[in-house]
Image (spheres, rainbow, N blue to C red):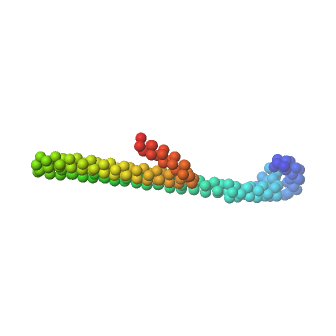
Amino acid sequence: MSFIHILAEVAPHAEAEAHGAAGGGGVGEIFKTFHVETPFFVSQVVSFLIVAFLLKKFAFGPIQAMLEQRKSRIAEGEANLVRIQQQLADSEKHTAEAIAKANSEAQRLVNEAKESAAAFSEQKSQEAIASAQQILVKAEAAARAEREQIAADLKREFGRLVTATTAQVTGKVLNADDQKRINDEALATVEA
C-alpha cells in the first residue's frame, strides 16, 4: 500500500483530530495540513534508516573496500614495473661493460701479438701472427659466448620478471603455457 493510499485512508481521521485539537504549535499545524500521522511518519523514518544502514553495510562498504584493494594492487604493479625497468637498465649496463671489457682484452691481445711478432725472425714472425690470429678468434669466440650467455640470462630474467609482474597485476596464477606465451611475446618485443 502506498503512502498516498495510507494518507487517503487516514485523512478523515486526521481532519477530525485537527478540529478536535485546540492548537499545537507550528509543527502540529504542518502535520495537520499535510495529514501526517505520527505513527506512520515514525515507521517510515525507521524503515528509511534501516534501509540506509543495510545499504551502507552490505552494498557501499564492500564496494569501497574492493576499490581500495584494486587501487593498492595497481600501485604495487606500477612500483614493480619501475623496479623491473631499473633492473633491465642495470642488466643492459652490465652487458655493455662486459662487451667493452672483452673487446679491450681482445685488442690488448692483438697488440701484444703484433709486438712479439716484430721481435722474432721471419719464422717466429709467422708463428706469432698465426698465434695472434688464434688468440683473436678465441677471444672473439669467448666474447661472443659471453655475450650470448649474458643475452640468454637477460632474456630468461626478463621473461621471469614479465611473468611475475603479469601474475601480480592480473592476480591470476599463470600455468606453464601462459608463462611460455608471455615470455615469447616479451622477448619478441625486446628483440624487435
Q: Residue furthest front?
A: 123
Q: Nearer the viewer, residue 4 or 182?
A: 182
Image coords of residue 97 (percent x, y): 30, 52
What residue appears at the point 74 percent right and 58 percent down from the top-left corner? 50
**Can residue 181 be seen at all in this image of the molecule?**
yes
Left or right of residue 94: residue 124: left
Image coords of residue 10 (percent x, y): 87, 51
Image coords of residue 189 (percent x, y): 44, 43
**Can residue 100 be seen at all in this image of the molecule?**
no
Q: Quadrant of the C terminus?
A: top left
Image coords of residue 104 (percent x, y): 24, 51
What residue appears at the point 27 percent right and 47 percent down from the top-left corner? 137
Left or right of residue 80: residue 92: left
Q: Nearer the viewer, residue 93 or 16?
A: 93
Q: How many numbered discs, if any?
A: 0
Q: Nearer the viewer, residue 22 or 13?
A: 13
Q: Nearer the viewer, residue 49 or 136?
A: 136
What residue appears at the point 16 percent right and 46 percent down from the top-left corner? 126
Left or right of residue 130: residue 83: right
Q: Residue furthest top?
A: 192
Left or right of residue 155: residue 67: right
What residue appears at the point 52 percent right and 50 percent down from the top-left corner? 179
